[in-house]
Image (cartoon, grey):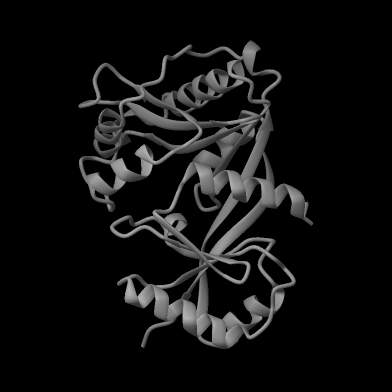
């Protein structure tokens, strides 16, 4: 069983590390909306109280109408904070789950001794977005302007790491959000032609060492459970699973 206080803390850190443009509430259910951005994290309903189970069907209807008015399909994020009756209601009313994600943490006490690059991060949002798109092969599901708005909205201290000589031909990228004693890794990616060379490990260690020098004591990240190479890398670096979450969508005819 996941520790609910730990889940609440990491979910809150996740909200700060991947902010939505609009946040509203339906009781304790957080409605997150970021038009133009493809990621589910920025566009989903997040229930935050296991005991908030009143009028589930009626409230789901109101939330669905809210997303529809914004031109966005509704997605529900199921973490250990999601009420069991809500999950049962979704399953019984034509919804299906997808995209299981493992949330993992690591203590950073030993990271000063780990061998790896010491990198100076960029704080140039446009340059980092260019590098992210280049690592993805020049294509991105999310428009450049939407990515720039999201990364530019980050409030905690943020390091944008680019491994490679230029942002036009980067080898790997990583975003590290230093938030008090936490360091959140986001957007870790290696260019297809540069994989299996240890670059993911290099940029991950460099980012976490940077955050540790600024006072972070724990690192955290989110990785899809279907991503076996990433899971193996993070296990090697000492990460352990704290909890899992998934998303629910309404089945379409």
Quadrant location of residue 221? top right
Whether residue 223 can be seen here: no
Instruction: Give the vertical position of 139 relative to 37 (above or below).
Output: above
User: Can you say which quadrant of the picture contains the C terminus?
Assistant: bottom left
How far across and down, in percent of the image, does residue 92 sit? 59, 87
Q: Which residue is drawn at 58% across and 35% down?
A: 234
Question: Is 66 positioned to the left or the right of 29 in the image?
Answer: left
How far across and down, in percent of the image, does residue 155 sit? 47, 37
Q: Which residue is drawn at 49% across and 84% down?
A: 61
Q: How many marks?
A: 0
How far across and down, in percent of the image, does residue 15 sit? 53, 49
Instruction: Give the vertical position of 26 relative to 13 (above or below).
Output: below
User: Can you say which quadrant of the picture contains the N terminus?
Assistant: bottom right
Could you say which is closer to the camera, residue 27 or residue 206? Answer: 27
Q: Residue at x 53, y 18 (%)?
A: 210
Quadrant location of residue 65? bottom left
Could you say which is closer to the camera, residue 238 or residue 196? Answer: 238
Q: Residue at x 41, y 20 (%)?
A: 121
Question: Is 28 positioned to the left or the right of 129 in the image?
Answer: right
How far across and down, in percent of the image, does residue 44 sit? 47, 64
Could you say which is closer to the camera, residue 233 or residue 136? Answer: 136
Whether residue 52 can be seen here: yes
Question: Is 241 positioned to the left or the right of 128 in the image?
Answer: right
């Amino acid at each position: 069983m996941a520790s609910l206080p730990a889940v609440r803390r990491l979910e809150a850190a996740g909200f700060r590390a991947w902010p939505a443009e609009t946040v509203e509430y339906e009781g304790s259910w957080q409605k997150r909306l970021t038009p133009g951005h493809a990621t589910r994290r920025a566009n989903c309903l997040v229930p935050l109280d296991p005991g908030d189970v009143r009028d589930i069907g009626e409230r789901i209807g109101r939330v669905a109408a809210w997303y529809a008015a914004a031109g966005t399909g509704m997605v529900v994020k199921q973490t250990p904070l999601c009420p069991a009756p809500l999950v049962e209601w979704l399953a019984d009313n034509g919804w299906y789950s997808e995209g299981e994600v493992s949330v993992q943490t690591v203590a950073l006490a030993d990271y000063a001794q780990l061998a790896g690059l010491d990198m100076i991060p960029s704080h140039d949002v446009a340059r980092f977005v260019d590098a992210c798109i280049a690592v993805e092969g020049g294509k991105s599901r999310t428009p450049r302007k939407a990515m720039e708005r999201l990364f530019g909205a980050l409030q905690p201290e943020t390091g944008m790491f680019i491994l490679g000589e230029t942002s036009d031909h980067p080898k790997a990228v990583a975003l590290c959000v230093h938030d008090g004693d936490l360091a959140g890794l986001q957007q870790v990616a290696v260019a297809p032609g540069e994989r299996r060379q240890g670059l993911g490990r290099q940029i991950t260690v460099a980012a976490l060492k940077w955050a540790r020098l600024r006072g972070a004591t724990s690192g955290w990240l989110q990785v899809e459970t279907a991503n076996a190479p990433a899971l193996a890398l993070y296990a090697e670096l000492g990460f352990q699973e704290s909890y899992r979450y998934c998303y629910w969508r309404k089945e379409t005819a």
